[in-house]
Image (cartoon, grey):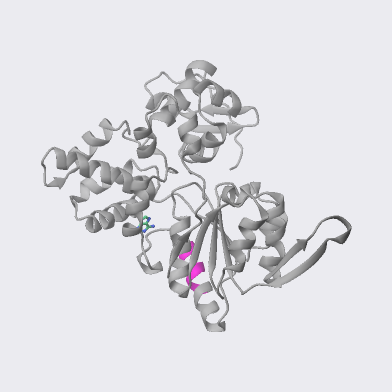
Amino acid sequence: MAIKRSSDSPDPDRAYKTNRSKQSSYEVTLLSPQANTQETENNEAKIRPQKLADYIGQKKLKGILNMAIAAAKDRADPLDHLLLYGPPGLGKTTMSLILAAEMGVDCKITSAPALERPRDITGLLVSLKPGDIIFIDEIHRLNRMTEELLYPAMEDFRLDVTIGKGQTAKTRSIPLPPFTLVGATTKAGALSSPLRDRFGIIQRLRFYELDELTLIVKRTAEILQASITEAGAIEIARRSRGTPRIANRLLRRVRDYVQVEKVATITEELAAIAMNLFDVDAQGLDWTDRLVLNTIIKQFNGGPVGLEAIAAATGEDGKTIEEVYEPYLLQNGYLSRTHRGRTVTAKTYRHLGYQPQESEPQQTELL
Ligand code: ADE
């Protein structure tokens, strides 16, 4: 299997770099579930599971994909188009690479912002070999023209291109080899229904359980040849916001810390000291999580407050708050969403050392 990355992919950290004047880029790199730095680029390939059997967690998704792979191989067909949705850092790209490896095909990785012009997607499509996988990250951000080129490509493996302009314009259909599109998004609801309807399999990735993250930390430590105790692995897992990418990044930072301290093994105590140093608290909340929650308490009396007001008051990008930070805070009871805006909970007051307010709004919206 070969991994190809579209060369003109935009910098995925740009939103962070431009919107985080208060934070050093170091903090951003460490804590963001989304940040994809050179360090992670270089090391991630080494620690990524290569086979479905090595992939820890997401049991239901693995079951479905195992079946889809077996059936597709049996029929000598490509896999059905697959839409993976869920918060960043949970393994959507990894899963796409595993699918390619299991099917014995190439995977071309790109993201919607890199597919700006029609020739970006047409170039990609005509370069495919039968069965290949195209992985499009942030697929909810595709522009209309690119999306419309994808419809016949996905449905009939056909590229409809218009040649010329005005009255002399002609449409030509170019046959494409059968391929699989894997779309990834943090916002399934933002996909247009014609696009969503063209995916044969739509699956959500969930936050990982503590035991799954602990196994991931231990597996990565073994690959990195870092010695770690069971309790040390649990401590890192506990502070990883249910997200393998964060777990692996924290492990690397803790490993740096023990190395500088000239200690041979990562223990629970050393892991805790190191992560406190990096501003990751006992529940795994980071600097930005606490900024958002503290702002709602101090400036908006606990809420309800709208996303744009939080963004303006914190200097963070509203989309980043919504797509990267909120899902974990909502799922873990630090934040609730009412029809009037975001509200912090009694758990948040306690966690941040405030006296809880008398009453909390009851009406919450389902995610
Ligand atoms: N590394 C990152 N995510 C992983 C996963 N789900 N299983 C095993 N190793 C991983």
Q: Quadrant of the C terminus?
A: top right
Tell me residue 68's x, y (percent). 53, 72
User: Does 235 appear in magenta?
Assistant: no
Q: Nearer the viewer, residue 199 or 10?
A: 10
Residue 52 seen in the figure: yes
Magenta-colored span: 61-67
Q: Position of residue 238 (x, y in %)?
A: 32, 43
- State the count of labels: 0
Q: On the picture, is 175 further left or further right than 230?
A: right
Query: Which x, y percent locates residue 328?
Result: 46, 40
The question of residue 65 being in magenta is answered with: yes
Instruction: Check the image and report above or below for 127 versus 363.
Output: below
| Chief secondary structure of the magenta portion | helix
Q: Position of residue 149 (x, y in %)?
A: 70, 60
Q: Quadrant of ligand 1?
A: bottom left
Q: Residue at x 21, y 51 (%)?
A: 230
Picture residue at 39% right of the left edge, 35% below the top:
28
Most foreground residue, 342 or 15: 15
Residue lying furthest right: 167
Query: In the visual, does 15 lie left or right of 81?
Result: left
Q: Quadrant of residue 254?
A: top left
> Residue shown at 35%/33% (left/top)?
27
Residue 34: quarter of image? top left
Q: Relative to 184, does residue 289 appear above or below in the rendering?
A: above
Quarter containing the N terminus: bottom left
Seen from the viewer's position, the closer of residues 72 and 144 is 144
Q: Is residue 60 visible?
A: no
At 32% from the left edge and 45% from the top edge, which residue is drawn?
A: 249
